[in-house]
Amino acid sequence: MGSSTLISVEGIVLKETPYGDTSKIINVFTKEYGIIGILCKGAMGIKSKLRSSTMKLSYGIFHIYYKKNKLSLLNNVDIINPFKNIKNDILLISYASYLLDLVNQVLKQTNNNAIYDDFINALIKIDEGLNPIVITNIIELRLLDYLGVGLNLVSCVNCGSKKEIVTLSSEKGGLICKNCYTNERIIPISIIKVLNMYYIVDIKSISKLSLKEDIINEINKFLTNFYDDYTGLYLKSKDFLKTIAKL
C-alpha cells in the first residue's frame, strides 16, 4: 500500500520543519484534503528552486505524489499569489503570521471548506491594502464557532428576544435585551451592527472599508479580550502583533 498518485492541489503553507540537512516537511492547508504533510527534498538548499515556494505563506498549486494519511512527496509548486505587499511590510507579515497560527489551531478541531475560502480571501485583501485589523477581526469572529465559543449576534442569549437589544455581553456570549439587562457593560448598537456585518460579509467582495477608527479599535479590543478569556488559545504571534501594533 506504499503507492502514491501524482495530483495537483491548491493550498497554502502553514508550517515548515527542517528534515535532514537540506530537506523539509511542510504542512499545506488545502480545500480538498485539509492539511497535508509534504516532504520537500532538497528544498532547504540555497540553490533549490523549491526553497522560496515552500516557505510559510506560500500559496499555490502543489504538484505532489499524494499518500493519504501519510507523508506526501513534493514534485513542484506553481505560485498563485506571492503576497508581495505582505512580505515587504513587517506589520502585514505580523497579521498574516497570526492568522496562519490561528487557522492552524482551529484546524485541529475541525476541517471546513468555509475556513479555507475565508482564510485565503483574507490574505488577498490584506495584500491588496485593506485594513488588516478589520480583515483579521472578521476571521477571528467567524472562527469562534469552530472553537465552541461563538457569539450569539441574532437574539438575546437569555430570553431569545430580538427586540430592544441594549448590549453585547462577552461573559454571556451574546446579545442582552432591555428586560434581561443587569449591570453588563454597555456596548453601542453601532458596534453590534458592524459585528453582524463582519459575520455575514463576503470577504472576496470587499473593495473598500469606510469604518470609523474608534469603531475598528473597539471591536478589535473586544475580540482580543474575548479570545484571551474564552478560547484557551495562547499564540506567540498574537503577543508579537499586540507589541508591534503599538509602535
Image: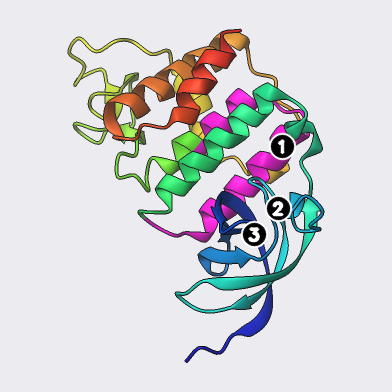
Is residue 206 in view from this perspective?
no
| Residue 129 quadrant | top right
- 153 lies left or right of 114: left
Q: Specify the amino acid type for callout 3.
A: Gly
Give the residue number, with chain letter if any, for mark 3. Answer: 11
Badge 3 crowding class, 10 Å Cα cut-off, few under 14, some 14 to 19, many 20 or more, is many
Q: Is residue 122 magenta?
A: yes
Residue 139 position in % (x across, y down): 52, 38
Which span of residues is magenta-colored? 110-139
Relative to 28, residue 145 above or below: above
Distance in Å between CA atoms under marks 3 and 1: 17 Å
Residue at coordinates 38% horizontally, 13% vertically from top-left?
187
Q: Which mark is residue 59?
A: 2
Upstream in the sequence, badge 3 or badge 2? 3
Relative to 218, residue 45 above or below: below
235 and 211: which is toward the camera: 235
| Residue 214 quadrant | top right
